[in-house]
């Protein structure tokens, strides 16, 4: 029953047989992605394939080998055990990324206008095909689930930290990333979080840390770790604000000087024009005044030698 | 005339140091061969001595010149704003500050941190400047307040330049 979604043979025929076996498995694969999205009640776009399948597969529990259940429940591992397997790189990708890959590969062939209109099986099939070409250049996205598009790029920055945080995935579905991760992560998301949510999050982030980390680590005392995080976040925020102001001043300085020079140039050009016009009138003035001096400079011999 | 003050607005001189005004007098400031355009960079080393300033205006009118630094000690933290660098009064129109009365002698720029603006503000006096006591401290000066205190009204001319600490020269 193990179906390889990552097909090495890209021929249409090979894929067809794959997809047929997929569809035999159950109705879900023939749903379009829009329908799947409605079924899940959650936007698909920035979900990674890991999460997508995890959500999809519960509907298929009847068809799966027993081992699959535990893997879904733990949500830790990158690989799918059970009916669908895919490479770790692929599972880390979000739906969006895979879609992009598909589209790039698709250009010469058919076109699927909307991601949502594609059926799930089609999507997975194409994802499997697409992965070969794009694997090398893709930016492995760490398996973070159920997040809004805004946080997608955040993941790339935090990637080395988040590998520690897999267990936190399920609890943070649908909430903000970064801060809710347990304490070791505290330092890293600060600047990134600040960059995305400048003023408002200032007060929220420490409380989020407290709120979420509690269920995670009930045994740990509320104390030093969170204080340190708070202070670091504060300090970073202040630094960032200062930096912004400095940048604004720098821009103002530059603009002021440019402004001044431009104005000066236009004033000088005007003056130049005026002077040129005056110059044209000059010869006439000279002509009028000239005869007299000549008269005065005439030499006459006065002394007989 | 708007083109004369636009750089002052962009450089936030109008706003932080003076209010919006209409320039009516021409003032040209030169440190040696360097003519000061708004927002230009002047090294502290060439500004050690007072610049040559020429102002237009009627010979019968008297003017007051203020040179101030609104970014002291640092633009990101102007705790001492403003620091007054020069105060000359009773300058006859069409002349220069040497013909006026130097209440506070010229002090060249020496910005410790960051890039500071140095602003020359010219006011037209209503009459002779009243006798005032010596200025005790250069820090915490307020140009606007000073102008209202001595009934100087809005400026008639303003020019500013930027200056920052020069890297220390290595001497062998």
Image (cartoon, helix red, strand yellow):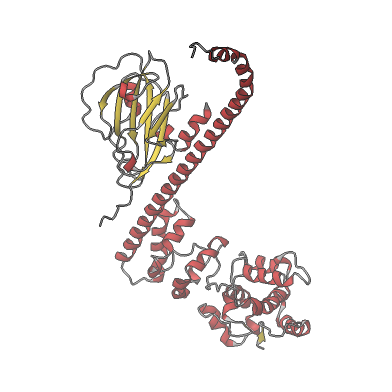
Which of the two residues, A216 or B5, is positioned nearer the viewer here? B5
- Looking at the picture, tell me which residue is in the foreground, A191 or B160: B160
Q: Quadrant of residue A221?
A: bottom left
The image shows residue A187 at horizontal and vertical percentages of: 38, 65
Between B4 and B154, the one nearer to me in the picture: B4
Residue A49, percent across and down?
60, 74
The one nearer the camera, A229 or A103, is A103
A159 to the left or right of A225: right
Residue at figure coordinates x 63%, y 21% from the top left: A283
Query: As drawn, is A163 to the left or to the right of B168?
Result: right
Q: Compared to A246, does B52 lie above or below?
A: above
Q: Quadrant of the N terminus of chain A?
A: bottom right
Q: Residue at x 66, y 65 (%)?
A: A38
Residue at (38% x, 70% y) in the render: A184
Residue A32 pos. (x, y %):
72, 70
Q: Is residue A284 above or below residue A147?
A: above
As displayed, is residue A156 above or below residue A91?
above
Residue A260 placement, left or right of B169: right
Left or right placement of residue A179 versus residue A8 in this view: left
């Amino acid at each position: 029953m193990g179906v390889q979604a990552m097909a090495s043979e890209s021929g249409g025929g090979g894929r067809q047989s794959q997809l047929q076996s997929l569809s035999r498995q159950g109705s879900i694969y023939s749903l379009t992605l829009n329908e799947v999205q409605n079924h899940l009640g959650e936007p698909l776009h920035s979900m990674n394939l890991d999460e997508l399948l995890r959500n999809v597969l519960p509907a298929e529990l009847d068809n799966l080998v027993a081992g699959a259940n535990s893997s879904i429940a733990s949500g830790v591992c990158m690989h799918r055990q059970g009916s669908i397997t895919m490479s770790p790189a692929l599972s880390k990708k979000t739906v969006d990324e895979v879609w992009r890959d598909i589209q790039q590969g698709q250009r010469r062939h058919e076109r699927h206008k909307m991601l949502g209109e594609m059926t799930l099986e089609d999507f997975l099939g194409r994802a499997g095909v697409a992965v070969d070409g794009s694997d090398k250049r893709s930016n492995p996205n760490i398996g973070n689930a159920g997040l809004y598009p805004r946080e997608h790029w955040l993941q790339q920055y935090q990637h080395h930290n988040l590998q520690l945080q897999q267990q936190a995935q399920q609890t943070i579905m649908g909430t903000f990333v970064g801060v809710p991760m347990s304490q070791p992560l505290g330092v890293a998301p600060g600047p990134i979080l600040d960059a995305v949510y400048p003023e408002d999050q200032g007060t929220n982030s420490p409380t989020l840390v407290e709120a979420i980390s509690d269920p995670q680590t009930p045994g740990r005392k509320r104390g030093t770790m969170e204080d340190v995080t708070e202070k670091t976040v504060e300090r970073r925020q202040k630094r960032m604000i200062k930096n912004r102001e400095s940048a604004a001043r720098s821009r103002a300085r530059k603009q002021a000087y440019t402004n001044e020079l431009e104005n000066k140039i236009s004033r000088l050009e005007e003056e130049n024009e005026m002077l040129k016009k005056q110059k044209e009138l000059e010869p006439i003035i000279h002509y009028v005044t000239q005869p007299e001096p000549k008269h005065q400079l005439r030499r006459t011999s006065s002394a007989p030698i | 005339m708007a083109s004369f003050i636009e750089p002052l607005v962009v450089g936030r001189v109008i706003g932080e140091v003076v209010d919006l005004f209409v320039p009516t007098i021409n003032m040209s400031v030169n440190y040696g061969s360097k003519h000061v355009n708004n927002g230009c960079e002047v090294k502290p080393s060439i500004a050690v001595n007072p610049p040559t300033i020429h102002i237009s205006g009627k010979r019968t009118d008297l003017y007051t010149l203020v040179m101030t630094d609104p970014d002291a000690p640092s633009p990101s933290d102007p705790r001492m704003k403003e620091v007054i660098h020069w105060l000359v009064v009773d300058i006859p129109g069409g002349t220069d500050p040497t013909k006026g009365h130097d209440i506070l002698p010229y002090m060249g720029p020496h910005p410790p941190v960051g890039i500071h603006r140095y602003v020359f503000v010219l006011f037209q006096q209503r009459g002779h400047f009243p006798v005032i006591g010596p200025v005790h401290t250069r820090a915490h000066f307020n140009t606007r307040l000073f102008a209202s205190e001595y009934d100087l009204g809005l400026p008639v001319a303003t020019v500013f330049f930027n200056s920052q600490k020069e890297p220390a020269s290595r001497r062998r």
